[in-house]
Amino acid sequence: MSLNERQQFICDYLITQNTYKTVSELASRFRVSTRTIHSDLNQIQFYVKGYELIKKPGAGVILKKEQNEKSKNHHEQCNDIIFNSKERQRRIAKKLLFNGETISIQNLANEFFVSKTSIANDLKVLSKDIFVPAQIQLIKSKKGTKIYSTESQLQTGLILYNELFLKDNTSIYLTKREFMRYLSEQYGKVIVQSCYDALVNTKLLDISNKYDFYFNNLLSSFVVLSYRVSLGYHIEEIPNNNLIVNEVKKLPIWIVANDLINTVSRKINCKFTQSDISYFTKQLIANRFENGTVNLELSKKFEPMVNRLIDKMSAYLYVDFQNDKKLKKDLLSHITFMMFRLKNGIHIKNPLLYQIKDEFRLLFDITRIALEQELQSEKIIPFEDEVAFLVIYFQGSLDRQRRSRRILIVCPNGFATSELVANRVRQILPPLDIVEVTSTHTLENSNLEDIDLLISTVPLKVENKKCVLVSPLMNDEDVSKISKIYNESFVYRNNSKEKEDSFNNLKELISFDFIDFNSNYSTMEEVIIDICQRLEKKDYILPGYADSVLKREERGGTDLNTHVAIPHGNPKLVKQSVIYVCRNNFGIKWNTYTVRVILLLCLTEQDIKNAKEILKELYMIIENKEQVDKFFLKSTKSMFYSMIGGNSHY
């Protein structure tokens, strides 16, 4: 166990103090209870080298240097704290992005008291989450490693730094006060307050109806721009820059950007260039701080694209989306600015991404395939955050098309506990659904013919009825479980008469020759490149397919929490549809999870229309640990092939 982020901040603070600080003072400063501070101090005293934590009744606590540590400066003192990986990565990122330092893996390992492997893994995380999306290069030389970027790329990196580190690990969202405090610690209170005041006080923008993540992202980019300008750095001049600036000036939103820039310029006493203003204008549009004229002009251009996307999703999901006017209106509004972001390299984080991927995985993957296919002509690969935004709209349309369903909550303690569960269920299921409660005793004599779904706090055996087992207090895992079973049972189910355990698509796409249950790959790149080379030699795919798979992984991993990955690439580079099955002998670090099973999906453009059924069959064999064990980890190549309906003579 190591110190968490709050405990590290407490250490940094106490090291700089020469007087005792009471527990109440610390609780007020760090906005936690006195009980939490007592717990933190107990943890800190075991993890601070070279210091003694002294507690004095009536006075408070103080960190005092041990005798042989008094010659150390503050920087050295802070480094004697054992940091967790997140805080270590934050400090490494700050060295590179804020200070422009040349770093050495060996020196960092010595500084943070960890192995060189740990530092190398830290740099991989930073590359995935910051440097690659921002197109910042890590240049290695004999002196060490440093970053190379344009000014706009560096500022994108700083915005992603804010997203990655300036957040509370226990919550998806930050309060405005917390967000302002974290930004102020990095960029200075004057700059942050000036940017915030300019945005909330301007009469040229309506921010009252904007989602917090759009406002926070805009504030973050405004603060980063102002901070860099205060240091004497400006957005780079690019070829034909005057033409681009003149085009941007034609947009009505440019007047707003210019006014906001001038307001902050006076407060921080710095001069912004025309390129800076053009850059900020794009940030305003990307974060949907537009006026009606901009919205109307841009949205007309993307109406055909929205219609094609709706047609694709209707065909892939066997659901009629064409008559949903609200869906079309919402998509048109969103895609207008999504395309602006994608074409200008602006990446906005979706705070619900992982929740959406977990609860609506099938819909997420179908949406991603449809969007990627639509964007092929633009040569754009969308970030998975953008895919998740679209999932919200399509899921909303599916909700509006459902008939009312009857949900019965069962609890041995009767009404009171059942109501606790019912209230939580009502929050996550469509409002038209009817949620009722009962006890286990009453259930025995109840007519369940009209009940669509049972949710119980105790195990039940009811024939021909779906039943979800949850805890009496309904935690997040229970919510996810209910959503998943509800969607699988009532949303994505089609009218097919095929049995649930049939794998008609898989047995057509999986050849015995393309099943490897004894591989020893070390990295994601090695797996993808080697498998693609094998498929290319057999004339299933064209050169370049591996690169298209890797590029998609950069925009969002295809790994699941069941330790399975389903990578896929550009359908235009597939000559014959196939699924290559690989079971590795040890785990490979993929994106978020460690992966043992890789299912490389190669679909031709003609077979994309069958993506829903193919993915449904895949998810049937990888949806949980038990299924992964059954089909892959505790099986053999021949057994697996037989289970999916392959020829048993192998």
Image: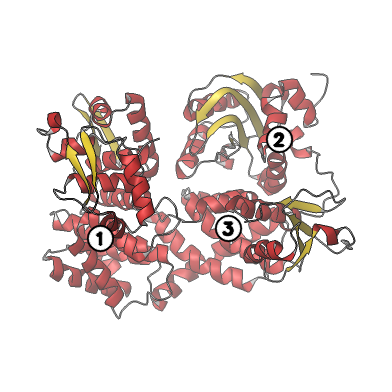
Residue 398 falls left or right of residue 548: right
Residue 341 falls left or right of residue 197: right
Q: How far separated are the C-alphas under marks 3 and 2? A: 26 Å
Q: Nearer the viewer, residue 186 or 208?
A: 186
- Percent position of residue 158, x then y: 29, 50
Residue 545 position (above or below residue 500): above
Of tags 1 and 2, which is closer to the observer?
Answer: 2
Residue 441 falls left or right of residue 380: right
The residue to which callout 1 is attached is 223
Q: Secondary structure at mark 1?
A: helix
- Percent position of residue 502, x then y: 81, 39
Among all residues in the image, which is located at the extreme bottom?
203
Dot 3 or dot 1: first in sequence order is 1
* Residue 127 visible to the viewer: no
Q: How far separated are the C-alphas under marks 3 and 1? A: 31 Å
Residue 512 falls left or right of residue 257: right
Of tags 3 and 2, which is closer to the observer?
Answer: 2
Asked whether the residues under the numbered discs 1 and 2 touch, taking CB atoms below 8 Å apart as contact, a structural biologist would say: no
Q: How far separated are the C-alphas under marks 1 and 2? A: 48 Å
- Percent position of residue 184, x then y: 24, 58
- Image quadrant where one finds the C terminus: top right
What amino acid is at disc 3? Val
The residue to which callout 3 is attached is 391
Q: Secondary structure at mark 2?
A: helix
The residue to which callout 2 is attached is 627
- Graded by Cα atoms within 10 Å as few (under 14), some (14 to 19) or many (20 or more), the crowding at tag 1 reads many
What amino acid is at disc 2? Gln
- Image quadrant where one finds the N terminus: top left
Q: Nearer the viewer, residue 28 or 535?
A: 28
What amino acid is at disc 1? Val
The tag on residue 380 is none
